[in-house]
Image: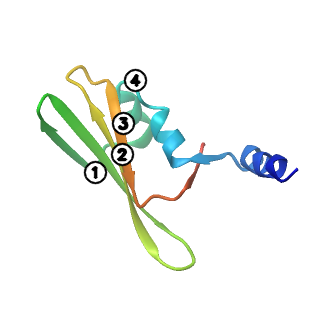
Amino acid sequence: MRLFFVFFFFLVTGCTTTSSVMNSWVGRNINDVVQSWGPPTNQFSGGGTTTYSWTNIWSNQYQINQCIQSFTVNSSGTITNFSYNNCPRLQRMF
């Protein structure tokens, strides 16, 4: 029963995990992310790949945090990997 209420909460609030949000972009072109999220905060190239990073500030009742979300893309612009650090566990889907 408790699991039902947790599922219902996510369904109603439109939240998902940060990992799920990031993973949903793998295999897509980086231009799709840029169109959705806006220009990246940083961009680094080397070894045939490019890493695009977005930095966002978020807070909870205890502190202000800096979330960094990054995608690694191959030479054709396809997202092959992602990472994130210090991001909230849940993110809004819309």
**Which residue is found at the position 44% from the left and 74% from the top?**
64
Label 3 vs 2, first from the N-terminus: 3
Q: Are the two marked residues, 3 and 1, in contact with CB atoms closer than 8 angstroms?
A: no
Report the residue marked by disc 1: 41
Question: Hey, what amino acid is under mark 4?
Answer: Gly
Label 4 vs 3, first from the N-terminus: 4
Question: Hey, what amino acid is under mark 2?
Answer: Ser
Report the residue marked by disc 3: 34
**Helix, strand or loop status at disc 1:** loop
Report the residue marked by disc 4: 27
The CA distance from mark 4 to mark 1 is 21 Å
**Which residue is found at the position 38% from the left and 42% from the top?**
38
**Which residue is found at the position 40% from the left and 23% from the top?**
27
**Helix, strand or loop status at disc 3:** helix
The CA distance from mark 4 to mark 2 is 15 Å
Residue 2: x %, y % from top left: 83, 53
How many discs appear? 4
The CA distance from mark 3 to mark 2 is 16 Å
Report the residue marked by disc 2: 83
* Crowding near the residue tagged with mark 1, few <14, some 14–19, many ≥20 C-alpha atoms within 10 Å: few
Residue closest to the eye, 71 or 2: 2
Asked if residue 75 lies left or right of residue 30, the reply is left
The CA distance from mark 3 to mark 1 is 11 Å
Residue 44: x %, y % from top left: 17, 43
Q: Are the two marked residues, 3 and 2, in contact with CB atoms closer than 8 angstroms?
A: no
Question: Hey, what amino acid is under mark 3?
Answer: Val
